Amino acid sequence: MTNPRGAVTITDVANAAGVSASTVSYVITGKRTISPATRRRVEETIRTLGYRRRTGSPAPVPARAGVLAVAVPLPGEGHLGVAMEFFAAAAGAARAHGFDLLLVTDDTGTAGLHRVTSAALADAVLVLDAGDDDPRVPVLLASGRPAVLVGRQRGPAAVPLDFAPAGRACAAHLAGLGHRSIAHLTPAPPRRIGYLTGFLEAAAHRRLEALSRPCAPEDVPRCLDELRTRRGPTALVVHDEAVLPPLLAELRRRGLRVPEDVSVVAVCSATTANHGWTRPTAVAVPARELGVLAVELAVCRLDGVPTAEPEPVTPALVLGETTGPPGG
């Protein structure tokens, strides 16, 4: 039951969600780690009750700041090219609508977003790589600021990314070339789980031996040492674009030819796919398309223009020069 005297309070949210007021506060501010199940329950309660964080006495609705905040993963998390392509495309689209962009990065995204929304520095927020259990979502719900959540599979303002078909296509492509043993190198922790799920499901259906393991750029020699025992896989799927250059260099150093001795598929930005020393077979993340779409949706929400729920964006497998039959 909400407060009959006025606006919904943190206590109202806490009572309805069955948690303490401090837990609600931690979920909103991101100052402590809260379990995904509790965070989802608080998030749904915030949305249902329409709670909005109060920053002082009521005031007239301010004029627009003319700024859109963009929350992207930190550099070094494996997909810097994707984040920069998204930001560049969003900047161009924002300028066409008379907005500037404000880049927000920190370890979890919650503290930075809390500062931006509390100070009303931006009119709306675009979030790249927003997972379904993303701790940034309650911050945005409580702020009342329009948001576009790129990568989130459910909920209002979500822009779903359907990576599973690309994962299945990758497994089918390598199996069609004759590969029976494939290693999937992921960031730690893994990201874009839909791709990995689709890949592993298709690999199991085709009775391929498919390994999945985390591999940071500095771990490439060790990973290859481990994988090349027992003859090792004949194909590698690299799900971290920061790993791709050192991996290709290490394969050359070991005298292994691509694709004659080992095939390589990259999950990466279009920039990485098109501007390397060789054009890899790749699942290119459509970051530029996503950047423009996110801005258009944010502006529509600010202007009160109704929009249809976005169709899932599906990356495609693009064939390049780094895959071929095993053993040449």
Image (tube, rainbow, N blue to C red):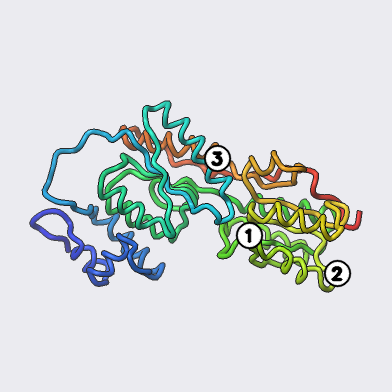
Helix, strand or loop at mark 3: helix
Q: Residue at coordinates 20% horizontally, 62% vertically from top-left?
A: 10
The residue pinned by badge 3 equals 85
The residue pinned by badge 1 equals 196
Q: Nearer the viewer, residue 306 or 27?
A: 27
Q: Residue at coordinates 71% horizontally, 55% vertically from top-left?
A: 246
Helix, strand or loop at mark 1: helix
Q: Residue at coordinates 67% horizontally, 54% vertically from top-left?
A: 167
Q: Residue at coordinates 84% horizontally, 50% vertically from top-left?
A: 324
Q: Is the C-beta separation of discs 1 and 3 under 8 Å?
A: no
State the CA–CA distance, disc 2 to disc 3. Answer: 38 Å
Q: Where is residue 46 in the image (x, y as percent from the top left)?
A: 28, 58
**Type of amino acid under label 2:** Arg
**Residue 132, image quadrant:** bottom left
Above or below residue 271? Residue 54 is below
Above or below residue 319? Residue 198 is below
Q: Quick one: label 1, few (<14), some, or many (20+) residues within 10 Å? A: many
Q: Which of 137 and 225 is in front in this view?
A: 225
**Type of amino acid under label 1:** Leu
The residue pinned by badge 2 equals 231
First of labels 2, 1 by sequence position: 1
Q: Position of residue 59 (x, y in %)?
A: 13, 42
Residue at far left of view:
5
Quadrant that contains the N terminus: bottom left
Q: Position of residue 222 (x, y in %)?
A: 72, 69
Helix, strand or loop at mark 2: helix
